[in-house]
Image (cartoon, helix red, strand yellow):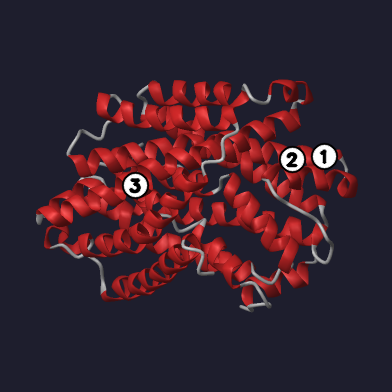
Amino acid sequence: MSRTTRFSMGPAALVAAAFIGPGTVVTASLAGANFGYALLWALVFSVLATMILQEMAARLGVVTQQGLGENIRAMATTPWLRWLLLSLIIAAVVIGNSVYQAGNLSGASMGLADLLPAATASISALPLVIGGVAASILASGSYRLVERVLIGLVVLMSIAFVGTFLLTNPNWSALLKGLLWPTLPTGSVLTVVALIGTTVVPYNLFLHASSAAQKWQHVEQLPAARRDLAISIPLGGLISIAIVATAAAAFFGQTIALESAADLGQALRPLFGDYAGYFMAMGLFAAGISSALTAPLASAYALSGVMGFKADLKSWPFRLTWFGILLVGVLIASSGIKPVQVIWFAQVANGLLLPLIAVFLLWACNQVRLGKHRNSVRQNSLGVVVVLVAVGLGMRSLASAFGLI
């Protein structure tokens, strides 16, 4: 078997690295602390929905040898539609990720400070250091290096979060019931939406399509892309499940304030010893730095595609995009500014973008030029279900942004 067709973790691991960030750690922790194991089924649904959309994105990238941004640009021939999409992508993916990047860098900094107490004194400088490391990796211009680093971080997160989970001695019967039996405890609806929303995100579709096109150049390699997806996305889901279950085992039924991802590790130490705290800190560091790499990378792919620039790690428009996002994130994280209004703006744009991009992905995967690799009836049916969920998420995001819920 040739090297190009032999299985190895690849672009789907980048997607897993992207959706397990500090924000996911907080959301999953709150879900477990407030509702125990009852909402684990939402993560099972999230993984399935993510696999449906990401399979389409990967297939589109491999067959067309273009990213999602390039395909959207080709399909949106009407000037007003192209400018609308461009505006939304810049607002939600580029500006939004610039702001969220501050959270990624802050999360990585808190995890590192928890691992290395001596670093606590210079916590405000850590985002600059971590941002510099991320910039060095992206500046290499090597897709293979970026991919290998992110695969390593996914493995590290798996060890850290699953290790913490095992140390907490979970209630296995309650965990299994939570995975298989959907329930909605009082007050849990927004938490369910948040759990799904942290996994099914629009910029991962751009990231996966473009990175799959770089990884595999022949349609005969689609089985390898699907095997990659079948391993990496469930692994990311397992990490989220482990975080929910850890918080459920440790804090469900107790009064505890978890305001940041670092709080979980600190709260675990008195209950389960230093090892639990160290595992959680290691996982938080890996989650932060992995998202700090993937958010700028996905934004660069998205913007380059819709603008018609070359989506290449070595091209200057591509480099300027990811560098700008990293720079904004470093400045915000180092200064301690809480950009509430910008986050509100990004939330509104994301609420509009997710269902719209999902619809365009479905449209793209039904194009005649894909030949026998177009969506089947079953794939379209599953895609429509996910799009309807995306519309629901978008409406919730908008309602939340405008203070209606």
Across the whole image, how many numbered discs are drawn on residues? Answer: 3
Residue 87 position in % (x across, y down):
26, 48
- Depth check: give the residue in front, 215 or 26: 26
**In the picture, which quadrant includes the C terminus?**
bottom right
Q: What residue is at 22 percent from the left and 54 percent from the top?
A: 84
Whether tag 2 and tag 1 are in contact, CB under 8 A, the answer is yes
Q: What residue is at 69 percent from the left and 72 percent from the top?
A: 38
User: Closer to the observer: label 2 or label 3?
Assistant: 3
Q: Is residue 315 visible?
A: no
Per the image, the residue denoted by label 2 is 279
Per the image, the residue denoted by label 1 is 275
Per the image, the residue denoted by label 3 is 91
Q: Is residue 76 positioned above or below 146 on the image?
A: below
**Quadrant of the rendered image containing residue 28:** bottom right
User: Closer to the observer: label 3 or label 1?
Assistant: 3
Dot 3 falls on a residue whose secondary structure is helix
- Residue 361 left/right relative to 367: right
Measure the C-alpha gap from mark 3 to mark 1.
41 Å
Residue 74 position in % (x across, y down):
13, 51
- Depth check: give the residue in front, 399 or 189: 399
Q: Amino acid at mark 3?
A: Ala
Q: Earlier in the sequence, mark 2 or mark 3?
A: 3
